[in-house]
Image: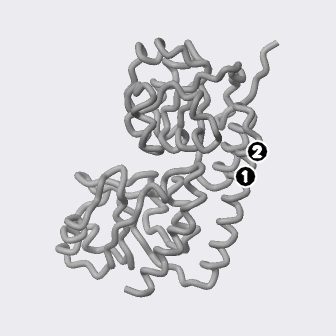
Amino acid sequence: MATTTKDQLSRTIVLPSWPFRIISLVPSETELLVDLGLEEYIVGVTKFCVHPNHLRQSKEIVGGTKNISLEKIKALKPNIILCNKEENTKDIVFSLEKEYEVHVSNVKNIVDVLHLIEQYKNLFNCKEKASKIATNIKSELANFQKFIQNKPKVSVLYFIWKNPWMLAGKDTFINSLLAINNFSNLSNTQERYPTITSEEIKQTTAQIILLSSEPFPFSNKHISEIKKLNISSKVILVDGEYFSWYGSRLQAAFTYFKELHLNLNTK
């Protein structure tokens, strides 16, 4: 009798048989798989799976996160495919689950990250490494919370896109990490990724505007562009991977956040 489990949407899936043949359609989950010691079992990834950087040379690229090649996936004969509610479309999940076991993650905060690592531990029988990563994340988070606890709240807007300008809003993983950083997200009462006009940017009361390195690759020229709107906010670039990649990258994220705050205090 097949052994079943639940994914983060409480969908029932059958545990994959050994040897695993995994396709990951989520960059941060691909990195997590490698850190769990599962690289040899990955057969397919997306073009956005950039960590570790050699992976796209050694694994089949099956498309992006929003568009995939069903022919390439079929040829790889996976026994499990990893998706994410936000990063992959419903159509992708529906089309894949007709033929394959599909695990869908749904990550909005650190608790969800730890839950996902626990699920992968059981799915792929990697107890030791999964437990170590989870312990490291908890320890790093606890240390950072001590570091940040007496620091004042700072109002921010977190930009993820241009043309149109787009922000990270409520109910997002980014928003949860902003809160951990004592950043008061002025768009956290709006939809998940609200747009904002240049006129609204001019009127913002945000103390700091954070321009993320992804998914839009903001750079210094965009700092100048926003400053031309005659705002009083400080405008800085931030590494979007530390704010939006969940999984094993969180082990290093809190060190980055400490450095970010220290730099804010010295500028």
Q: Which residue is mark 2?
A: 128
Q: Quadrant of residue 157?
A: bottom left
Q: In the displayed image of the protein, which residue is found farthest to the bottom?
A: 266
Residue in the foreground of this view, choosing between 173 and 29: 29
**Image height of 93 relative to 229, above or below:** above
Q: Secondary structure at mark 1?
A: helix
Q: Circle 1: is it few (<14), some (14-19), or many (20+) Cα within 10 Å?
A: few
Quadrant of the image occupied by residue 206: bottom left
* Residue 114 horizontal/vertical position (percent): 69, 50
Q: Quadrant of the C terminus?
A: bottom left
Residue 34 in which image quadrant: top right
Q: Say which amino acid is labelled 1.
A: Lys
* Residue in view at x 46 percent, y 31 percent: 45
* Circle 2 residues within 10 Å: few <14, some 14–19, many ≥20: few
What number is the disc on residue 191?
none
> Which amino acid, by three-letter code, is at mark 2?
Glu
Residue 128 screen position, x and y as percent: 76, 44
Is there a contact, CB below 8 Å, between mark 2 and mark 1? Answer: yes
Residue 51 position within the rendered picture, expressed as x and y whole percent measured from the top left: 46, 45
- The reply, left or right, for residue 124 in relation to residue 51 is right
Q: Residue at x 25, y 78 (%)?
A: 231
Q: Secondary structure at mark 2?
A: helix
Q: Which residue is mark 1?
A: 132
Question: Residue 200 or 68: which is nearer the viewer?
Answer: 68
Q: Kindly identify the residue that appears in the image at 54 percent across and 62 percent down.
A: 253
Q: Position of residue 81 (x, y in %)?
A: 56, 26
Quadrant where the N terminus sits is top right
Looking at this view, is 133 or 81 the one in front?
A: 133
Q: Is residue 129 left or right of residue 240?
A: right
Task: Count how many numbered circles sit on residues in the image.
Answer: 2
